[in-house]
Image (cartoon, rainbow, N blue to C red):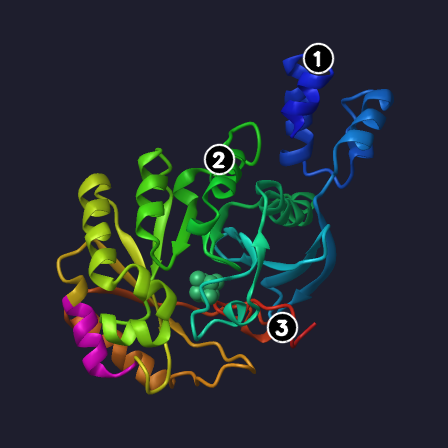
């Protein structure tokens, strides 16, 4: 956006550099603080460019203070949410949304229950990150990691995902290395191939949640009909062969549905000898979804079956579940601890 303004007003490159430094790196709270520009130029900028495309509604803080879920509205009134997770090792990871709602409708996901409103623009995606950057920079910190795991399916909003990564990854702008960016998808195979073929190589997480097509179709019917599990795993093979990189498989454990030892055995067979890492997630409850979370014992048993069969596995700590900010919980009515 600054490039368009600079072109229109014939600004020299150093003016863009000054802007980028203050807007993205110093994370100034308004264009009035763009101290490297003259007051006249700042006023012109304010008239022609929006400081943020999002209206901030509220921040919800988890009881341990490490997770903040922020609710925004787009200028045309749609709800979106993003989450900041602050880790003790110094990482500050932001989970961004790429849609308001989601058309895919996975049965365990609160966002899916919203229906689909619209795709977000690249600026609306970047403005979620900048909100947290503005919180962190005054404390001498910054956003270090980014996960496209919030509301919506990234592969259905590819152009805006790519444009946002261009800003995120740009050394003059947010300067977050591509190795610190993760794209999570339920598996839109053609779009995935298109995306990776263009040279974008962030980390890849596949929302798997079932070890076979039949079970996957029963809890993720939309994507399973379009791109059955076999096709998804063919893509995984192509990805491993092409990039020699590991894929993270997200697996939400739902009581009595996909959490039994036989499911773990089948999952280990599906991922045997693959460059795979399994991320087990305890189902996070939501009022409109009938599923229940598996017990800790069941989660441990599932993990041990996988590990005994040589599959690298971790159980994800669900940060922010008390504020409706954990995986599968993003929905504007879901903020219990505000
Ligand atoms: S899990 Fe992802 S793709 Fe499925 S409904 Fe939720 S946001 Fe959409």
Check disc 2 and report the residue beneath it. Answer: 169
Which residue is rendered at x = 66% and y = 48% of the image? 131
Residue 70, horizontal then vertical, whole percent: 65, 60
Q: In the rendered view, does 6 fall on the left or right side of 303?
A: right
Q: Quadrant of ligand 1?
A: bottom left
Task: Say whether residue 132 is magenta.
Answer: no
> Where the N terminus falls, by quadrant?
top right
Residue 213, horizontal then vertical, whole percent: 24, 70
Question: Regarding mark 1 in the picture, which secondary structure is present there?
Answer: loop
* Residue 331, quarter of picture: bottom right
Check disc 3 and report the residue beneath it. Answer: 63
Q: Residues within 10 Å of mark 2 (few under 14, many from 20)?
A: some
Give the distance between the C-alpha atoms of the residues marked 3 and 2, in whole angstroms: 32 Å
> Where the C terminus falls, by quadrant?
bottom right
* Residue 208, quarter of picture: bottom left
Query: What predominant SS class does the magenta segment belong to?
Result: helix
Whether label 1 touches label 3, CB < 8 Å = no
Within 8 Å: ligand 1 and the Cβ of disc 3?
A: no
Give the distance between the C-alpha atoms of the residues marked 1 and 3, in whole angstroms: 50 Å
Q: Residues within 10 Å of mark 3 (few under 14, many from 20)?
A: some
Within 8 Å: ligand 1 and the Cβ of disc 2?
A: no
The part of the chain drawn in magenta is 259-269
Check disc 1 and report the residue beneath it. Answer: 10
Which residue is rendered at x = 43% and y = 70% of the image? 106
Within 8 Å: ligand 1 and the Cβ of disc 1?
A: no
Report whether residue 310 is seen.
no
Q: Mark 3 or mark 2, which has the lower sequence index?
A: 3
Question: Regarding mark 2 in the picture, which secondary structure is present there?
Answer: helix
């Amino acid at each position: 956006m600054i490039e368009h303004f600079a072109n229109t007003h014939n600004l020299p490159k150093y003016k863009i550099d000054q802007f980028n430094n203050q807007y993205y790196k110093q994370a100034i709270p308004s264009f009035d603080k763009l101290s490297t520009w003259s007051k006249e130029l700042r006023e012109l900028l304010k008239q022609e460019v929006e400081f943020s495309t999002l209206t901030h509604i509220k921040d919800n803080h988890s009881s341990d203070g490490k997770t903040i879920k922020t609710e925004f509205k787009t200028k045309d009134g749609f709800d979106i949410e993003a989450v900041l997770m602050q880790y003790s090792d110094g990482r500050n990871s932001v989970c961004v949304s790429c849609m308001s709602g989601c058309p895919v409708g996975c049965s365990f996901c609160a966002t899916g229950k919203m229906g689909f409103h619209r795709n977000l623009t690249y600026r609306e995606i970047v403005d979620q990150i900048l909100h947290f950057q503005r919180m962190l920079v005054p404390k001498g910190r910054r956003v270090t990691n980014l996960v496209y795991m919030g509301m919506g399916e990234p592969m259905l909003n590819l152009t805006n995902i790519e444009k946002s990564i261009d800003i995120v990854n740009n050394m003059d702008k947010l300067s977050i290395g591509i190795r610190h960016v993760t794209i999570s998808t339920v598996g839109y195979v053609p779009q995935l191939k298109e995306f990776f073929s263009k040279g974008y190589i962030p980390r890849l997480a596949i929302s798997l949640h079932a070890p076979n097509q039949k079970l996957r179709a029963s809890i993720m019917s939309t994507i399973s009909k379009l791109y059955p599990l076999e096709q998804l795993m063919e893509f995984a093979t192509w990805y491993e062969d092409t990039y020699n990189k590991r894929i993270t498989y997200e697996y939400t454990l739902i009581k009595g549905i996909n959490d039994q030892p036989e499911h773990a055995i089948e999952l280990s067979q599906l991922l045997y000898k693959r460059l795979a890492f399994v991320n087990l997630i305890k189902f996070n409850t939501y009022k409109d979804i009938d599923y229940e979370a598996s017990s800790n014992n069941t989660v441990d048993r599932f993990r041990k079956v996988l590990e005994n069969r040589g599959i690298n596995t971790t159980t994800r700590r669900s940060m922010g579940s008390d504020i409706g900010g954990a995986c599968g919980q993003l929905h504007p009515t879901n903020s219990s601890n505000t």
